[in-house]
Amino acid sequence: MSDSFPGMNRLVWRTIEPADEAALIALDAACKSVDGEEPVSHLTADALKAAAMNSDNSLCVAVRGQMAAAGWVLASEPGEGIQRIRLGGQVHPEFRRRGVGEALLAWAESRALKLAKPNVTLQLMITNEALTEDANALYLDYGYENILTEQMLVRSLGGPALSDPLPEGLTERSWDAASAPLFFQAYAEGFSDRLGDIVPVQAEWIAEYAEEDDQFRPDLSRVVLEGEKPVGFVTCEMDGQTGWISQIAVVQERRRKGLAHALLAGALNRFIQEGCLEAALHVNANNARAAAVFLNAGFVPRLTRAKFVKEIAMGA
């Protein structure tokens, strides 16, 4: 693919190749230097994966040997009448506000429509880990709905250990095959006011941690018990020298009694023992109660992440 877009004749548009790995890494670093550092997105891996599946599922925008932008499309097989296709892309800060981002999105949607199966609801999904005002406006202009907005909060781990005693009468266990269902029970009850009737299947929720998450640290994760009843939990991950609070929750009857602080402080202390330099987590933008707990514990906002969806009914 070597088409030129109107008004962008200096740019070369082509598919992504394995030899582009270094340029993709450089593009990712340039974007993060402006938008903010976050270890959650995987620009290089996603772009190369899409290209490996089908070269036409990737797009590189180059100028004078420099990668100005990259886009990719990752499609899944339909299930229960829905086919989800992830769209991804980044534009180098030096080439923004020139229509490149809009052209990338138009290409990605066009490619997704070619990959869509007949008689399904096509669900186009975009996740942006460092949302900018321009990107948000672009997605909304193209008819996407914002279904999730979260703040990335971070905290330095320099300094002494924190006080983290459990409230009296409670005990805790780390994650293993026997305790994993207790973690799930604490999750389902702790997030019941936010999950509503949409609760994951226990086996699938456990497998996402135990089998699919390479950064999950079961030894650092804890479930708190009152007798045999799970009343709170925290799951932890590590990415380099950053300790991640993946999920943390307390059942309703145990809230505002010091358990959330004890769970959080305990996790931070274990990160410190592992040599982490900072801790990070995501909190839903509309969850002011949880955000207050983290802010009071010394976390500060760094980035905004968001997920956008657009659904298209496909004919035969």
Image (cartoon, rainbow, N blue to C red):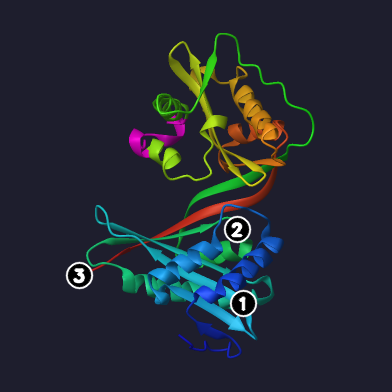
Image quarter of residue 263? top right
The mark lying in front, picked from 2 and 1, is 1
Q: Secondary structure at mark 2?
A: loop
Q: Residue at x 57, y 31 (%)?
A: 220
**Dot 1 lies on which element?**
strand
Q: Are marks 1 and 3 in contact (CB under 8 Å)?
A: no
| Residue under pointer 2 | 131
Residue 59 shows in this picture: yes
Is residue 201 one of those drawn in magenta? yes
Q: Amino acid at mark 1?
A: Ala
In this view, which residue lies farthest toward the left? 316
Q: Which residue is mark 3?
A: 316
Q: Quadrant of the C terminus?
A: bottom left
The earlier-in-sequence mark between 1 and 3 is 1
Magenta highlight range: 191-204
Residue depicted at x 74% and y 26%: 161
Front residue (pair 190, 227):
227
Q: Which residue is mark 1?
A: 68
Q: Are there few (<14), some (14-19), or many (20+) residues within 10 Å of tag 3?
A: few
How far across and how far down the image is residue 296, in percent? 71, 31
- The amino acid type of the residue labelled 2 equals Leu
Taking 220 as reference, is 262 above or below it? above
- Identify the mark nearer the N-term, 3 or 2: 2
Residue placed at 67% from the left, 71% from the top? 93
Q: Residues within 10 Å of mark 2 (few under 14, many from 20)?
A: some
Q: Where does the image place residue 264, in percent across and percent down from the top left?
A: 62, 29
The residue closer to the viewer here, 194 or 21, is 21
Disc 3 on helix, strand or loop?
loop
How far is the residue under mark 2 from the one under mark 1?
19 Å
Q: Who's the residue at 71% across and 63% down the image? A: 34
